[in-house]
Amino acid sequence: MRPTHVLICMMTGLSASFPIQPPLPSTVNSTNWTGYPTRTLANVTVIDTPLVRDALAFTRKHSSDEVWNHVMRGWLYGALILEDNDTLRATVDPEVHALAAIMHDLGFDQTPSSPIVSADRRFEIDGAIAARDFISHHGTQESWPERRMQLVWDAIALHSQASIYAYKEPDVAAVGNGVSADFTAPAVFGIPEQAYAAVLQEFPKVDLLGSVEQTFFWLCQTKPATTYDTFLQPWGERLVPGYSAVGHRGMDMILENLEQ
Ligand SMILES: *[C@@H]1O[C@H](CO)[C@@H](O)[C@H](O)[C@H]1NC(C)=O
Ligand SMILES: *[C@@H]1O[C@H](CO)[C@@H](O)[C@H](O)[C@H]1NC(C)=O
Ligand SMILES: *[C@@H]1O[C@H](CO)[C@@H](O)[C@H](O)[C@H]1NC(C)=O
Ligand SMILES: *[C@@H]1O[C@H](CO)[C@@H](O)[C@H](O)[C@H]1NC(C)=O
């Protein structure tokens, strides 16, 4: 069954207030890092496979300028976290990390009639499903056994839940940490200040808070049932007039059924 697609009328907050970042800035190529081709982006070494490039193009098409820059920063911060840690470099699959980081916010797609955004699933799950679909239709399935696919799926589905992803596979944790680093000071994740600043220069934060609030408003307004009992609930209470989770929370269900 295809999900009902949500038609979006909240586009005004998304008009570009700065030039669109070129999807693939200038690169220096080499082949290294566990045998994958790499290039440098904002002075960070990143994996550079056709699948990663296609995921970038796909994500650019389904992201506002603000979300795109956030996604790129989250990927690059994650790559920096991996780069500085021998244990992580030896264990994390860089293509799994790249694809999950790049596609982690596909559930924010506000393009009209988005084929990604459902009416009834939380945005993280829309993103995880879209990423799985994207990879499985790419024609590289033989290098994508279910295990790798599941890591991408979990990394996207859990990226907003630090108290869970931190205990998952290092690939999953790296995606969440890279994304979280966009909302913290560089030192929190041990990213050198100069490297953090170079990423910001290439992919600037322009009104990140305004963009976050517009996106959370849209999600809490258009599909509130997917936000109750999640980190979005307090944003709904703060931003959306008339929004109330009361009666829809796990607590309400338990009280209703168990209270004498
Ligand atoms: C890097 O690789 C891309 C695609 O394979 C190619 O178009 C580009 O010219 C290369 N850049 C350098 C500096 O070799
Ligand atoms: C990566 O670079 C290092 C040092 O330059 C080299 O020893 C190693 O063989 C390279 N690995 C690959 C897969 O090319
Ligand atoms: C780029 O990164 C290297 C370390 O990987 C650092 O030594 C160099 O200063 C950085 N360059 C810039 C312009 O930030
Ligand atoms: C490398 O990452 C692992 C897993 O997150 C962590 O336990 C370890 O402390 C890190 N090592 C360094 C040197 O930061």
Image (cartoon, rainbow, N blue to C red):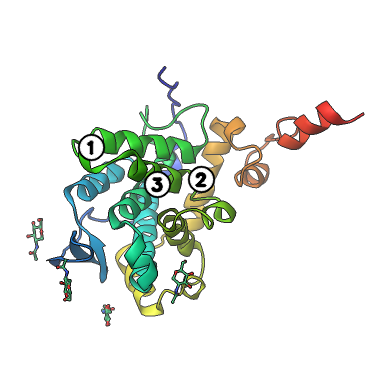
Q: Which is nearer the eye, 64 or 138?
A: 138
Left or right: residue 138 versus residue 100 is: left
Which residue type carries mark 1? Gln
Comes first in the chain, label 1 or label 2: 1
Give the x, y percent position of residue 110: 41, 37
The secondary structure type at the circle numbered 2 is helix
Disc 3 within 8 angstroms of ligand 4 (CB): no
**Mark 3–mark 1 distance (CA, rounded to whole Å):** 15 Å
Which residue lies under the disc numbered 1? Answer: 141
Q: Quadrant of the C terminus?
A: top right
Give the x, y percent position of residue 90: 33, 66
**Mark 1–mark 2 distance (CA, rounded to whole Å):** 36 Å
Q: Is residue 79 visible?
A: no
Residue furthest out toward the right? 260
Question: Residue 82 occupies which quadrant of the picture?
Answer: bottom left
**Mark 3–mark 2 distance (CA, rounded to whole Å):** 29 Å
Left or right: residue 161 versus residue 15 is: right
Which residue type carries mark 2? Gln
Comes first in the chain, label 3 or label 1: 1
Which residue type carries mark 3? Leu
Which residue lies under the disc numbered 3? Answer: 151
Q: In percent of the image, x 65 and y 37: which residue is there?
A: 228
Neighbour tally class for label 3: few under 14, some 14-19, many 20 plus, Cα within 10 Å: many
Which residue lies under the disc numbered 2? Answer: 214
Give the x, y percent position of residue 35: 18, 61
The secondary structure type at the circle numbered 3 is helix
Disc 2 within 8 angstroms of ligand 3 (CB): no
Comes first in the chain, label 3 or label 2: 3
Q: In percent of the image, x 27 and y 56: which residue is there?
A: 21
The secondary structure type at the circle numbered 1 is helix
Which quadrant of the picture is home to ligand 3? bottom left
Q: Quadrant of the N terminus?
A: top left
